Structure formats: structure tokens, C-alpha cells
Image (spheres, grey):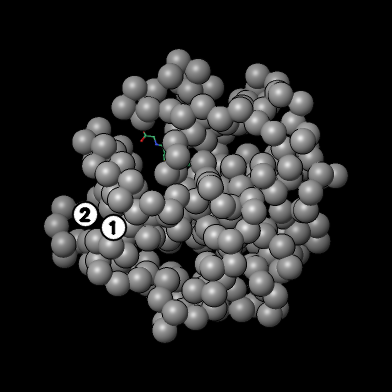
């Protein structure tokens, strides 16, 4: 495996932003050290490496920190352009389209995610956030059809930027399904996304990274709520 022992990820195992970075490192076949952070008691290394946002993930490459998950992914794709598949399309137009949808996911799905789990004061507010997630996922159903051109992933034949950005949320979606008593990615409502989820979860680079133990994720939610994280 490439990586040369000089890559380290500071993360939290449930974080959609960390998960996407770890999947990209796996796709590229890069070895890395992983350090689990406690968001209630952040390490000096995290605070020193990301003093502006104090958030995970941080990628340390030869000791130098890179912050913000989508920037980290692009960095990995550029530095290791020759290893593994390209995560961002090489064609500038297609790259712009992929970046647009990745930003859409974080803007709409990401804000609905925090709304459904962390920022809702009551069930009415949770329901409003669920409705926003539903709307974003319906839009992404159309984006998948358009971007994939009938191939398995947003990235075409292989997993790409939009796949990892959306796929990072899947562990939490399963936990939210349990809370709301129905599926967010519902095969009846968004059949393409439901089939995509199966393929994505089954990929070698993804297995073991996207959490699949809903009870464990829900228990972790309680610790995040207790420390007031993601507010
Ligand atoms: N825009 C950032 C978001 C990162 C983020 O929000 N990470 C959360 C964990 S999921 C975090 O570290 N929050 C800091 C805190 O809760 O104190 C990225 O894409 O890397």
C-alpha cells in the first residue's frame, strides 16, 4: 500500500465528513494511521491542526494539516493522481458538475441531517427537517440519473466525489430511519438511490467504514447530544 506511513487522519467514527475521506484513502489504496477524537475533549493535535474550525476530519500529510473534508478529498486526488481511480472527473466541465452536486449534498442533506438529529427541539421541528431531507433526496434521485448516465454510481462506473459525500451520511440515515419509523432512502420514492445505496455499501472501500450497527450509532448520538456537539 502506498502512503509511506506519513498519512494520519484525525476523526470520529460516525462523522459523515471523516467517513468520506477514509473511503477516498481506501479507493486510492493509501495506508494511513487513524486517530479517534473525543469531541468533548479535543486533542492538542486537533486544536493545533485545525485552530479555525476545531473540527474533524484533519488529514496530516508528512505532519502538515489539511482541513475541510471536500478540500482534503481533492488534495488526495491531486497528490495521488496516479494511484487508484480518479475521484473527481478529469474533464473540467464534469468536475464542475460533480463539485456542484457535492456542495448541494452538504448544503441541503447536511443541514437536514443536523436538523433531524441535533437541532430539533421537538418532533415538529424534526418533521420539518425530515421534509427537507426528503426534498433534497428527490432532487438527488434526478442527479443520479443524469450524472451516472445509467452506470452504477454518480461517478459513473466507479465511486466518485458525489458518491462519497452522500455515502458518508448513510450510517446516520439508518439511525434516523429507526427514529422516524420509515426509510429516508425509500425504494418506492427514490428507487435509483435505494439501489445505489446497496451497491455503495457493498464496495470494498466502503465496508467497515460506513457504520452498520444502528444501536451503536444511536448510543453515540446520546453522547454527542450530551456534549452539545453539532449544534
Ligand atoms: N465542513 C466540515 C464539517 C466538519 C464537521 O462538522 N465535523 C464535526 C463532526 S461530524 C466536528 O468536528 N464538529 C466539531 C464539534 O462538534 O465540536 C468538513 O467538511 O470537514
The residue shown at (37%, 60%) is 174
Q: In this rendering, is residue 78 above or below 34?
A: below
Q: Residue 84 appears at what percent x and percent y? A: 79, 49
Which quarter of the rendering shows the N terminus?
top right
User: Would you say the beta carbon of the disc 2 residue lies within 8 angstroms of ligand 1?
Assistant: no
Answer yes or no: is residue 221 visible: no
Answer with left or right where residue 65 lies relative to residue 231: right
Q: Residue 121 appears at what percent x and percent y? A: 16, 53
Q: Residue 198 appears at what percent x and percent y? A: 54, 68
Answer yes or no: is residue 212 visible: yes
The residue shown at (45%, 50%) is 211
- Tell me whether the residue at label 1 lies in contact with that at label 2, contact meaning CB atoms closer than 8 angstroms: yes
* Element assignment for label 2: loop
Residue behind mark 1: 116
Residue behind mark 2: 120
Answer with left or right where residue 33 lies relative to residue 231: right
Amino acid at each position: 500500500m502506498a502512503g509511506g506511513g506519513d498519512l494520519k487522519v484525525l476523526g470520529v467514527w460516525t462523522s459523515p465528513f471523516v467517513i468520506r475521506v477514509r473511503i477516498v484513502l481506501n479507493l486510492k489504496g493509501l495506508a494511513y494511521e487513524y486517530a479517534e477524537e473525543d469531541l468533548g475533549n479535543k486533542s492538542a493535535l486537533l486544536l493545533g491542526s485545525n485552530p479555525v474550525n476545531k473540527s474533524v476530519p484533519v488529514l496530516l500529510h508528512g505532519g502538515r494539516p489539511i482541513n475541510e473534508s471536500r478540500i482534503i478529498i481533492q488534495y488526495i486526488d491531486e497528490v495521488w493522481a496516479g494511484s487508484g481511480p480518479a475521484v473527481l472527473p478529469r474533464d473540467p466541465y464534469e468536475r464542475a458538475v460533480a463539485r456542484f452536486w457535492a456542495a448541494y449534498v452538504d448544503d441541503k442533506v447536511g443541514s437536514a441531517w443536523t436538523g433531524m438529529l441535533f437541532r430539533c427541539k421537538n418532533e415538529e421541528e424534526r418533521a420539518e427537517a425530515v421534509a427537507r431531507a426528503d426534498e433534497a433526496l428527490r432532487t438527488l434521485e434526478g442527479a443520479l440519473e443524469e450524472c451516472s448516465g445509467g452506470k452504477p454510481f454518480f461517478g459513473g462506473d466507479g465511486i466518485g466525489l458525489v458518491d462519497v459525500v452522500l455515502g458518508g451520511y448513510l450510517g446516520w440515515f439508518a439511525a434516523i430511519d429507526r427514529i422516524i419509523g420509515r426509510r429516508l432512502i425509500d425504494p418506492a420514492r427514490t428507487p435509483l438511490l435505494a439501489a445505489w445505496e446497496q451497491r455503495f455499501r457493498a464496495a470494498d472501500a466502503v465496508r467497515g467504514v460506513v457504520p452498520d450497527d444502528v444501536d451503536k450509532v444511536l448510543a453515540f448520538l446520546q453522547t454527542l447530544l450530551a456534549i452539545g456537539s453539532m449544534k
